[in-house]
């Protein structure tokens, strides 16, 4: 096996730009990344005349199901359901005593509870809609937290919950949009 620096195309991932391309006996080429990950396996396959697993096939076999970091957003969905149940009960009790916005929040928390439960159903069916509903749920929770902070606190410096929720929402949505595990899990 030898390496070249010229523009070439990786036989595994299709990349055309790499610092190095590694050429094997059967004239296949691997970019630096694929060579680092699969070089020995690739050579062994050539020696035994087996087929070459592509990067997507390899990742697809390794990253299926609700494992890895995907457990965190799913766990947060359970926490959101519990939080919505408690908030619904508190709002219901407050609306009975006829205090201001309470009846409005009874319906808001009932809607959020329905959204969160529907989201979990689609998540466990591994439906693509589950991923989209999870993102919508996180945005809904962010908006709900912001409204609650505005009604509870008069000073904007006290909107700590909104800031924390915004940061967590941003991280979770970045993960859900960029993760290979998420792409391989939610395929239906």
Image (tube, helix red, strand yellow):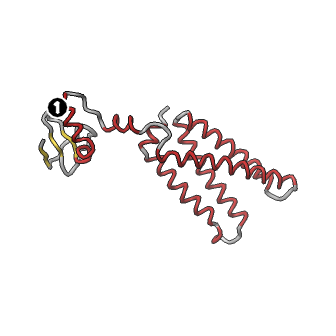
Q: As rendered, which of 13 and 42 lies closer to the eye?
A: 42
Task: Give the residue displayed 34% in from the left and 34% down from the top.
Answer: 57
Instruction: Indicate the secondary structure of the residue bearing disc 1.
Output: helix
Q: As rendered, which of 92 and 147 lies closer to the eye?
A: 92
Left or right: residue 188 compared with residue 136: left
Q: As rendered, which of 133 and 34 lies closer to the eye?
A: 34
Against 168, is 35 above or below?
above
Q: Name the residue carrying label 1.
A: 47
How many residues crowd mark 1 within 10 Å: few (<14), some (14–19), many (20+)? Answer: few
Task: Give the residue displayed 34% in from the left and 36% down from the top.
Answer: 58
Percent position of residue 159, x then y: 64, 66
Residue 152, quarter of picture: bottom right
Percent position of residue 71, x then y: 52, 45
Residue 161, quarter of picture: bottom right
Percent position of residue 7, x then y: 17, 46
Q: Which part of the image, by quadrant, shows the N terminus? A: top left
Task: Give the residue displayed 53% in from the left and 34% down from the top.
Answer: 127
Percent position of residue 70, x then y: 50, 45
Left or right: residue 9 compared with residue 122: left
Task: Give the residue displayed 56% in from the left and 59% down from the top.
Answer: 166
């Amino acid at each position: 096996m030898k390496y070249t620096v010229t523009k070439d195309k990786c036989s595994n991932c299709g990349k055309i730009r790499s610092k190095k391309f590694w050429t094997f006996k059967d004239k296949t080429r691997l970019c630096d990344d694929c060579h680092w990950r699969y070089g020995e396996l690739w050579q062994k396959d050539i020696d035994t005349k087996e087929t070459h697993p592509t990067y997507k096939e390899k990742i697809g076999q390794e990253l299926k199901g609700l494992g890895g970091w995907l457990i965190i957003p799913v766990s947060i969905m359970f926490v959101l359901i519990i939080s919505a149940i408690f908030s619904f009960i508190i709002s219901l009790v407050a609306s009975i005593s006829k205090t201001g916005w309470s009846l409005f929040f009874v319906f808001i928390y009932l809607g959020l509870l329905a959204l969160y439960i529907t989201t979990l159903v689609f998540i466990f069916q591994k439906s693509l809609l589950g991923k989209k509903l999870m993102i919508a749920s996180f945005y809904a929770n962010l908006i709900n937290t912001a409204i609650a902070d505005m009604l509870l606190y008069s000073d904007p410096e006290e909107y700590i919950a909104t800031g924390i929720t915004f940061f967590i929402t941003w991280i979770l949505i970045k993960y859900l949009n960029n993760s290979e595990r998420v792409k391989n899990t939610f395929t239906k």
